[in-house]
Amino acid sequence: MSLVVAGCVSLSGLRGDHVADGGADADVADTGTADTSVVPTVDGAVEAAADAAEAAAPVSGHRIFVTSATFDGNLGGASGANARCATAATNAHLTGMFKAILSDPGGDAKDRLTFVDTIYIVATGHQISTVATDATELWGGKLRTPISYDENENAVPLGAVWTGSAADGTLPGSCHCQQWTLATGQSSIGNCSYMQAGVFHSGGWAGSSAATNQEWALANWAAGATSYDCALQARLYCVEQR
């Protein structure tokens, strides 16, 4: 018989051998039965199994999540958005550097981020799903699975996610809440404003956390406008960088 004990040691053909008083080996007859005083150690088995499941993530890949927290359009600029991603990752005890998928006049998301391997989400119970195999697929307009789990592996409800980006990772126009420093919805004409109920609103480009088509990055959120009101709350996509 084989037993697996702590430290992944396998004991085959366990016999009743033991050490006699004084440290000398005592010969005993092989009765064909195991010494019932020997009990395998299984402490931490459940935790080890969970760790093994989590370790199944592609080690050279990039984890991505949507934040559990929501924010208005004043993210503190692109650097502020990155800081929010870093805080979310740290609070969830995730290692590595995480940055926001966000474009503004200072740069496109696709140029701010580097991908060398698979982009994946981790769902409840350490379940891993591929979002895209590489940058080409990520920015190709169709994801394999929606980015709908947060940093704590919890599913988030359908909602808006600030991106400032089209599905190709570029800034498609001027809808960026004044480079992500504006949290005021009403505005004068301009600054990517749109009319709703007789009032002009400032908007920022936002995607949908439930989408796998191009709307994952840029969705329609208001009648007559694709931008999302800067005064409203939305999440961020955060992706691991190496």
Image: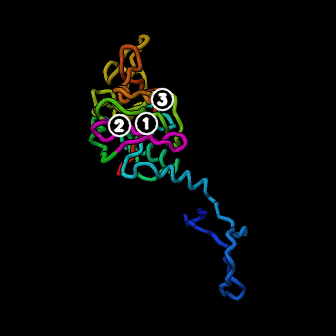
Q: Is residue 77 left or right of residue 170?
A: right
What residue did someone put label 3 on? 233
Does dot 3 land on a helix, a strand or a loop?
A: loop
Does dot 2 land on a helix, a strand or a loop?
A: loop
Q: Is residue 219 above or below residue 15?
A: above
- Amino acid on which the number 1 mark rests in the picture: Leu
Q: Is residue 56 above or below residue 171?
A: below
Residue 176 rendering spot, x and y as whole percentages: 34, 30
Distance from Cα at disc 3 to Cα at disc 1: 10 Å
What residue did someone put label 1 on? 236
- Amino acid on which the number 3 mark rests in the picture: Gln
Cβ–Cβ under 8 Å for marks 2 and 3: no
Cβ–Cβ under 8 Å for marks 1 and 2: yes
> 66 or 77: nearer the eye?
66
The residue that appears at 65% across and 72% down in the rendered structure is: 15
Is residue 125 one of those drawn in magenta? yes
Residue lying at the far top in this picture: please name it.
198
